[in-house]
Image: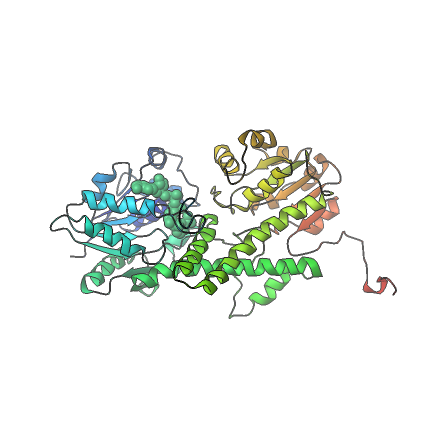
Amino acid sequence: DMTIGKICCIGAGYVGGPTCAIIAHNCPSIQVTVVDLSEERIAQWNSDRLPIFEPGLDDIVKGCRGKNLFFSTDVEKEIIEADLIFICVNTPTKNYGVGKGRAADLKYIESAARMIATVSTKSKIVVEKSTVPVKAAESIANILKANVKPGVKYQILSNPEFLAEGTAVKDLLQPDRVLIGGDQTPEGHEAIQALCWVYGHWVSKDRIITMNTWSSELSKLAANAFLAQRISSINAMSAICESTGADVTEVAHAVGMDTRIGNKFLKASVGYGGISGFGGSCFQKDVLNLVYLCECLNLPEVAEYWQQVININDYQRRRFANKIIESLFNTVTNKNIAIFGFAFKKDTGDTRESAAIYICKYLMDEGAKLHIYDPKVEEKQLITELTHPAISDDPSRVKELVTIHKDPYEAANNTHALVVCTEWDEFINYDYEKIYGSMLKPAFLFDGRIILDHQKLMGLGFNVITIGKRLQRPNVHRPYAQAPAQ
Ligand code: NAI
């Protein structure tokens, strides 16, 4: 029987919340309940102020909530009643023990699987939606089988999520593809068909692809690794541009017009999250996950290849911070520096693995006084990131060095430099004449996202430094003919 009446989703985060809202919105006959251990998160999902910001999400949630979309902390009850369970819990990089700093931490997946095994009294389809290493579905199956109750049967599917934060609603409504992996057995095919039926309510058949479980699990890691690799590739080119006089935006344009390469995801910047970028949290964590997998499979050459994608990303952030310090006469100690943007990319309040964290860290290490403004990131979140032990070993120093502002003009007032860390649209149209007027001179502007009008800013008097391009002040023309005589 393929009918799905009730869906339970474990994990009410960036993936679980929006995904279930879209399923409820498109499948009026299915009752969808999102559960989480965090009472605070569930209370927020049930309030007027949702825990995450995504364009278009408020309307969709408000349209279905209380009808066929519910948010609850009663994890056991919802698991018992569900025909199909999505596991959407977090799978962060392990920060302890074996595989520390690289392997994905599967403890939340395991505890969700154990909970399902403990309470279920009827057969279920269990769908792994979290991003996991290859063969994680097998581990879930082993946990379920080892604890199974008589008469209960499970089918495990892999259904990785490809949404990008900031465009989650659009990505879920019109996905490039929906990927479903499952056992290549009659029961496996039946479970695959049941999940195809759910997506079939709004996704056309030719965009729903099915395959074996391992291919599906690996495809998610592969897709994120390829995307991250493009950004590291263009960022590597940006370093060459800065040392030569080439302009990375022009290079990306020329390269991207090759239809075999394509123009998307080729924007150099201070970190992941160029145009329509993927999750700041996901890229790093998923590529590290892949690297660790390769090492475990005894494929060191492959591991090293993908590790380099991470290394270039770290290098890019470090390089940008060094450029700030160098430009400010090699010292930023006690200098006021405004930071515009803290989210890992525009249109989200998510800060996980944001480039801004590292830029702030490097500047704090030098004793700079930071004045941070972001349109969406909450003050509490920002402080949590900056006081993380990997970023600062002394929370009182963060307090001393960091001021958070609600107004960008206030943040920039009386600073030596302004650093753009996130590509928020609103930054483009600020009154930079006013900002320049309020800053200490010489006033520096570092555009880490290549979004501002550099010629205009230089015309106002700013010293502008960006990525992948050396800027010349206007009216200063140095033809080759004036090269020093030999
Ligand atoms: P998140 O951290 O926002 O949400 C995970 C939620 O799961 C948390 O609210 C946590 O309290 C809850 N949770 C953990 N263990 C639980 C348990 N045993 N029972 C009930 N609730 C539990 O994570 P996010 O960003 O939604 O990511 C989830 C997964 O999806 C990860 O594997 C991630 O790699 C993947 N993913 C994330 C994307 C993104 O853009 N954020 C995109 C595509 C995939």
Relative depth, front residue between 229 and 362: 362
Residue 243 lies left or right of residue 354; in this view the side is right
Residue 254 to residue 148: above or below:
below
In percent of the image, x 54 and y 35: which residue is there? 393
Residue furthest right as drawn? 485
Tally of numbered tags: 0
Q: Could you say which quadrant of the image residue 412 lies in?
A: top right
Residue 280 x/y as whole percent? 48, 49
Residue 420 lies left or right of residue 464; in this view the side is left
Residue 455 x/y as whole percent? 71, 51
Q: How is the image coloured?
A: rainbow
In percent of the image, x 81 and y 62: which residue is there? 479
Mark yes or no: residue 265 visible. no
Residue 226 to residue 103: above or below:
below
In percent of the image, x 25 and y 55: which residue is there? 156
Q: Quadrant of the N terminus?
A: bottom left
Residue 320 x/y as whole percent? 63, 49
Q: Quadrant of ligand 1?
A: top left
Q: Quadrant of the C terminus?
A: bottom right
Relative depth, front residue between 429 and 3: 3
Residue 318 lies left or right of residue 131; in this view the side is right
Residue 44 x/y as whole percent? 37, 35
In percent of the image, x 64 and y 53: which residue is there? 467
Mark yes or no: residue 334 visible. yes
Q: Could you say which quadrant of the image residue 330 lies in?
A: top right
